[in-house]
Amino acid sequence: MYPVLDDSDDETYDILKSLVADYQKEGFDILHVRRGNRKGYKAGALRHAMSLLKVILVAIFDADFIPPRDFSKRHCHILQTRNRFCGNCRGSC
């Protein structure tokens, strides 16, 4: 699932709602996630979204970052030897 976290308080809400609906029609497992408040800002949005997910691995990207196609293959192998991992990458990852 691809949750799109939206804490916006401007016209971004309508833009994202429409964009996510378009991707859903194409068959993507994507969800427009909004909270009732903005408590905690980004961290609060992440915490809320994590409560909705039933997955083993999570990758978090800024909205302006496009990960390389092989991101998972290049980075998830780390989890084979570690119970938990938190990393940060820049540029091409």
Image (cartoon, rainbow, N blue to C red):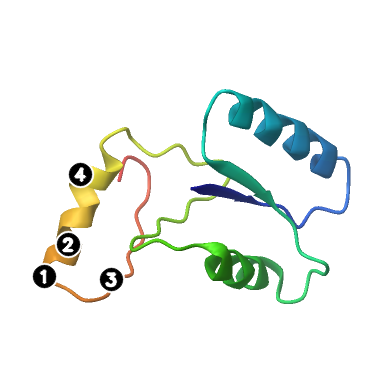
> Residue at the location (25% across, 36% down)?
70
| Viewer-closest of 88 and 84 | 84
Q: Are dots 2 and 1 in contact, CB under 8 Å?
A: yes
Pick whichever of labels 2 and 3 is earlier in the sequence: 2
Q: Amino acid at mark 2?
A: Ile
**Residue on which the image places disc 4:** 73
The first of marks 2 and 4 along the sequence is 4
How many residues crowd mark 4 within 10 Å: few (<14), some (14–19), many (20+)? few
Dividing the picture into quadrants, the one containing residue 57 is: bottom left
Residue 60 located left or right of residue 93? right
Give the distance between the C-alpha atoms of the residues marked 1 and 4, in whole angstroms: 15 Å
Q: Are marks 2 and 4 in contact (CB under 8 Å)?
A: no
Element type at mark 2: helix
> Mark 1 — residue?
81
**Sequence order check, earlier mark of 1 and 4:** 4
Q: Residue furthest right?
A: 10
Q: Which residue is mark 2?
A: 78
Q: Find the distance from the CA under tag 2 to the CA under tag 3.
A: 8 Å
The secondary structure type at the circle numbered 3 is: loop
Q: Given the image, on which type of amino acid does mark 1 rest?
A: Thr
Residue at figure coordinates x 56%, y 23% from the top left? 26
Give the structural element (helix, strand or loop) at label 1: loop
Q: CA distance from mark 1 to mark 3?
A: 10 Å
Instruction: Check if mark 2's residue and mark 3's residue have beta carbons within 8 Å.
Output: yes
Q: CA distance from mark 3 to mark 4?
A: 15 Å
Q: Which mark is residue 85?
A: 3
Q: Quadrant of residue 11?
A: top right
The residue type indicated by label 3 comes to: Phe
